[in-house]
Image (cartoon, rainbow, N blue to C red):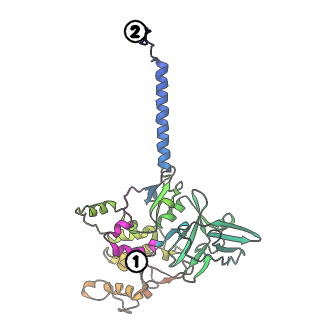
Amino acid sequence: MQSTLPNASAPKARRRSGPAARVRQVVLGLVLIGALFGYFVWHMINTPRAVKLVAGQWVEDTGAYAGVAACRECHREIVEKQQASSHANTLRALKDGGPRAPFDSTEVIDPLTGARYRMDAQPEPSIAMTLGGQGAKLPVEFEFGSGKIARGYLSRLDDFRWLDGRLNHYAGTNQWDFTSGQEKPNKFLETSPLGRTHEGAGAVRCFACHTTVLKVNGLGDGPSNGAKLKVRPDKSVLGIHCESCHGPQLDHVKERRAVKPVKPRVRLTADEMNAVCGRCHGLTNVSPEHPVISRFQPWGLSVSRCYNASEGKLSCATCHDPHEDAKSDITHYNLKCISCHSGKPESIGKTICRVNRTSGCVGCHMANDSTSMLHTTLTDHRIRIPGKEAR
């Protein structure tokens, strides 16, 4: 019987371990490392990441968010009040329920060009324009604004560009009209007749003020000003909710659920509070001659004599509960003024009005502005004596 065992005396095959083989191994290793690094970079660029604006630059937001449901566990009354506010309902995807304004094809005519604009509901929500027998039409995807003042609409043009439709629906008139700032013919309409185009950083900033968590693709793939960021509304938390102002709170929620001692709450100073509101409601480098200055309320407050004389106490929250819409009762605000300017011992040192010490404060010292936004009256927050510059 023939043995199947190997011949012990046969010479063994010599393994190739020369210089050429080692070079091939090194090259293969480098190729593998390069492929892994390329995949890592691709993954980092194409994975939606939360971002925030810091000193004019978009950086990754590494905070851990808990979500509204977790906040409601302990703060039900406050959360439910906030969820009914305009802030919480300031942005929605139309695919999740359609527009809340009447898309009834009512035409708005540009008096200078004769172009006719309308919002159509069928076959899908769209903005349309006709002029001289020619027309253009584009589906709208997102509805901005709660409707308390107005509702505006954005359409996606490509990964980095969005169209701000030329029509808004205004609560004050319950009608369609041109978007504030687009009511007059502008050169951009020659190439974008349906509205103004927001590119790169402009589009990111637009969504950032209407979301609690904004996620994008492309962070690190270009300048940090946001020019190469692709907004991902489908991965973001739309609307302004608890953590938009209070910051990421997952760690706080975990402590509460584990019945652990909670870290003492650090209250914001008036300056910090105004800065939080000013991220979307104000600018720090605006000129008093800005044509829509009344829209920048925190800035107006910060240059007021009342703010400077308050010793760091006067903030947006002095008069407004951030968890609900601003009150429309003028008496509420007059009482806030009188609480400091009353002549009582605790307000000694505060200037007392010589004209009327009991009412009329806001109407006299905070002018109404009906020019900064179409069909809307805003309150100028530069508290001052009429006819004199804010100090």
**Residue 340 appears in the figure:** yes
Residue 79 within the magenta-colored segment of the rendering: yes
Q: Residue 326: percent from the left, percent from the top?
A: 42, 80
Residue at horizontal 46 percent and vertical 27 percent from the top: 26
Chain part drawn in magenta: 61-88
- Toward which corner of the image does residue 251 lie, by quadrant? bottom left
Q: Disc 2 or 1, which lies upstream in sequence?
A: 2
Q: Where the N terminus falls, by quadrant?
A: top left
Going by the image, does 66 lie left or right of 221? left
Q: Which residue is mark 1?
A: 324
Going by the image, does 360 lie left or right of 96? left
Residue at horizontal 47 percent and vertical 58 percent from the top: 215
- Toward which corner of the image does residue 82 lie, by quadrant? bottom left
Are there few (<14), some (14-19), or many (20+) residues within 10 Å of tag 2?
few
Q: Residue 76: percent from the left, percent from the top?
A: 34, 73
Q: Residue 249: percent from the left, percent from the top?
A: 34, 62
Q: Which residue is mark 2?
A: 8
Q: Amino acid at mark 2?
A: Ala
Residue at horizontal 68 percent and vertical 76 percent from the top: 110
Q: Residue 239: percent from the left, percent from the top?
A: 46, 68
